[in-house]
Structures are given as C-alpha cells and as structure tokens.
Image (cartoon, grey):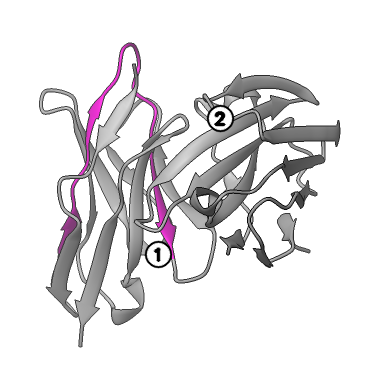
Amino acid sequence: AQSVAQPEDQVNVAEGNPLTVKCTYSVSGNPYLFWYVQYPNRGLQFLLKYITGDNLVKGSYGFEAEFNKSQTSFHLKKPSALVSDSALYFCAVIMRFGAGTRLTVKP
Amino acid sequence: DTAVSQTPKYLVTQMGNDKSIKCEQNLGHDTMYWYKQDSKKFLKIMFSYNNKELIINETVPNRFSPKSPDKAHLNLHINSLELGDSAVYFCASSQLARGSTDTQYFGPGTRLTVL
C-alpha cells in the first residue's frame, strides 16, 4: 500500500524566515512523490515531484524538497518565506494525499 | 484557456435529489480523476478513467456514477443525495494511466451542499 503522512496540521513562520513542511512516506517499490499547493477556494496546483535522481528537487515559486530514503521523508522547504506562500500544502504519492498542512506566513 | 474546467462551481440541493457535475480538460491527457475533499480538507480519490475506461473505483457508493463520453470529459452523476455528500469535488487529469509518475492538473472544484 502507498501512503504519505503529514505530521503537522499547521506551520507558522515569519516572513523572510526559512520554512519546512514535513512529509513521510510508506511505499512499496520506487517512491514517486509530489507536493501540491491549494490556495483558498482553488484547485490544487503542482509544485514539484521526485521520480528518481538528485535527492534535492527544485520546483515552482522557489520551493524545493529533499528526498531522504533512510528517513522515508520528503520535506518541502523554502529559504525565505513570503506572506503569499500562505496556503494548504499536500504531499502525495500516486493518488494518495496526505491530510494537508496549513502554512501561515506572518509579516 | 482553462486546462481543467468544472461546472457548476457551486451546487446547492435538497436531500434525495439527483445531480451531475461536468468536467472537461483541454490538455490532451489520457487519464481523468474525481476526488472528494471533505470539510477537514482531506482529499480522497473516487474514480479514475483512462481513455474512457474505468480503471479505479475506490469503494464509492453506487449512488455515484462517473461517465466518460470521450477522453476529454468525465462527468459525475450522483443519485439520491445525502447530507454526507456535501463536499468539494475536484476533477483532475494526467497524461499517463494511473498517473504514477505524472503530474495531475486539477480543476477549480465544485462545492456541493446538500440541505
């Protein structure tokens, strides 16, 4: 069975500070992992994905994610948060989505 | 130029009614999906179609019947609506079957409220 878990319902950071949104996975076979973002009253938008290769994946809007096989994690990161990054973030494997993490960036 | 579109955006109806939600994608993708997002924002796959053929049905009640007239369209018909059907329904598409390595493109969602 394929699944992902997002251990934090809510992450709060100050603008300009680095942010991390956590995701762990449980996958049989090769892990194909995704991050999506959902702004209020909108559909999900693709941020980035890990298929194979470099463990550090770069995506849209300055986001990146680090694939860690030994820790079965795929954490989303950004060096300097913006207020406009405030949204709901989903980690996913195939069609299984995590519960979502609400990121709030305060000015 | 909307890639994945859904109609209607909002749907308010009484318990027991039958309603449909339409989805269209202009990306030329082979696979389309329906997801349900509940009030806690949890997103769950309902159905997946590849080239008009049902490939995934995730233990969804028989009251829900997807229909794909062609690979660009995937409609969702719901019979005998119940209060628990209230949710936001998202359509999505991807290039490959099952979308295992493929990015999914989501529609804007249809907010269904059953009174």
The local crowd at label 2, few if under 14, some if 14 to 19, many if 20 or more residues have their Cα within 10 Å, is few
Can you give x and y, in whole percent of width and height, for residue B66 in the image? 73, 34
Can you give x and y, in whole percent of width and height, for residue B105 in the image? 60, 48
Q: Tell me the quarter of the image containing the C terminus of chain A.
A: bottom left
Image: magenta residue range: A18-38
Q: Which residue is found at the position 64% from the left and 48% from the top?
A: B81
Q: Find numbered disc 1 in the image and state the secondary structure of the residue it sits on.
A: helix
Can you give x and y, in whole percent of width and height, for residue A65 in the image? 27, 46
The local crowd at label 1, few if under 14, some if 14 to 19, many if 20 or more residues have their Cα within 10 Å, is few
Q: Tell me the quarter of the image containing the N terminus of chain A.
A: top left
Foreground of the two, A95 or B112: B112
Residue B74, picture quadrant: top right
Q: Which residue is found at the position 81% from the left and 33% from the top?
A: B68
Which residue appears farthest toward the top when viewing the image?
Answer: A29
Residue B103, picture quadrant: top right
Is A47 placed above or below B44 here? Answer: below
Q: Amino acid at mark 1?
A: Tyr
What residue would you read off at disc 2? Answer: B60
Q: Which residue is found at the position 53% from the left and 66% from the top?
A: A42
Disc 2 to disc 1, how far (Cα)? Answer: 36 Å
Q: Which residue is found at the position 47% from the left and 32% from the top?
A: A95
Q: Is residue B8 rendered magenta in the image?
A: no
What residue would you read off at disc 1? Answer: A61
Q: Is residue A25 rendered magenta in the image?
A: yes
Can you give x and y, in whole percent of width and height, for residue A72 in the image? 17, 27
Q: Pointer 1 indicates a residue of which chain?
A: A
Q: Amino acid at mark 2?
A: Val
Foreground of the two, A105 or B5: B5
Q: Which of the two marks, 2 or 1, is nearer to us in this view? A: 2
A45 relative position to B50: left or right:
left
